[in-house]
Image (cartoon, helix red, strand yellow):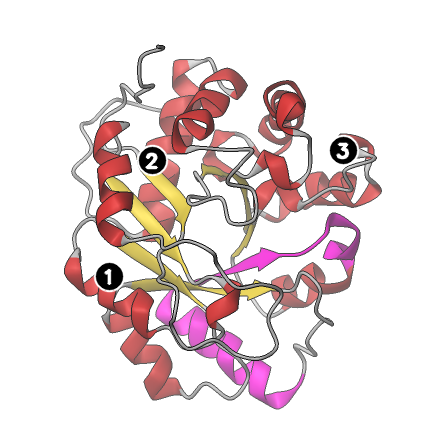
Amino acid sequence: MSAVPRFAIASSVDTHAHVFERGLPMPDARRYAPEEDALLGTYLHHLDTHGLAHGVLVQPSFLGTDNSYLLQALRAQPQRLRGVAVVDESTGDEQLQALADAGVVGMRLNLIGLPLPDLNAPGWRRVLEQANTLGWHVELHLQAERLPDLLPALLAAGCRVVVDHFGRPDPALGVRDPGFGYLLQQADSGRVWVKLSAPYRTWRAADCAASGRQATAQLLQAFTAGRLLWGSDWPHTQHAGQASYPAAVRWLQDWLDDAGPLQAVLGRTAFELFRFQNDMPNQGDTP
């Protein structure tokens, strides 16, 4: 049996995971419902086992804008965890502030299977303005081919944007997807980050190491390690048979085998974006 992979980097951060229980209230308009629980205690055990100091919990799509379970987890571990909530154009400023007070540092637009919102509508303009005031980023989850239809509006609104899961290129095209090429071109904005996470949502499990490495190389060249993040995507919803926490750690170790970029992706970049207290040792400039 192979050893459990660990990150030998101080204060590493997993920037993408979910916690939930079956039986929580869910909106009728959802893509699926979970078949297993993903409990906070189990997630914290994964962090400990794999040498990670901190985690970022992302509101899952099937819980909609009811972020109460997420907030419960954040309040249980205020130093170790941060959150990314799901809101809509009707979410009030006081509600957004309450989320921020509980440890939320970003809002997610999960648009897989959904129409694009009109971000120029008054409600969305107010929400984005308040997100900027709070210092939040906007996390964007949609197919790469749709990025040109939404990313310009977010950048025009002054938002910092985190693009999920390699930008979700077309599985048949991978890095040849024009949408992925468009994403690479956004590096010059200085306000776009990309998560190296969930390769199985684009490629077959057998191809995750090689294809993820190819995509990572192009993203690293365009964005540098200072604009890249890593997330386990635990508990790998709808893909639990193709992925695991150890696999997610090993994939990143294969994609980034240079200590400098790995340190930046796992530590410095995530610490700054997700506003963890800086307990990292001074290691000089990171490429």
Dot placed on the residue nearer the N-terminal end, 1 or 2: 1
What span is in magenta?
121-148
Q: Work out which quarter of the rendered image holds the N terminus and state it.
A: top left
Q: Amino acid at mark 2?
A: Arg
Q: Residues within 10 Å of mark 1 (few under 14, many from 20)?
A: many
Q: Is residue 273 left or right of residue 256?
A: left
Q: Label 3 vs label 1: CA separation?
A: 35 Å
Q: Residue at x 60, y 27 (%)?
A: 216
Q: Is residue 141 left or right of residue 285?
A: right
Spot occupied by residue 113 in the image (x, y as percentages of width and height):
71, 64
Residue that mark 3 sits on: 174
Q: Is residue 196 above or below residue 77?
A: above
Secondary structure type for disc 1: helix
Q: Is residue 149 left or right of residue 46?
A: right
Quarter of the figure with residue 282: top left
Q: Work out which quarter of the rendered image holds the C terminus and state it.
A: top left
Secondary structure type for disc 3: helix
Dot placed on the residue nearer the N-terminal end, 3 or 1: 1
Question: Do labels 3 and 2 touch, CB within 8 Å?
Answer: no
Secondary structure type for disc 2: helix
Numbered tag placed on residue 268 in the rendering:
2
Q: Label 3 vs label 2: CA separation?
A: 28 Å
Q: Nearer the viewer, residue 31 or 104?
A: 31
For discs 1 and 2, the disc positioned in front in the rendered view: 1
Q: Residue at x 46, y 35 (%)?
A: 226
Spot occupied by residue 166 in the image (x, y as percentages of width and height):
62, 40
Q: Is 144 covered by the magenta stretch?
A: yes
Numbered tag placed on residue 74 in the rendering:
1
Q: Amino acid at mark 1?
A: Leu
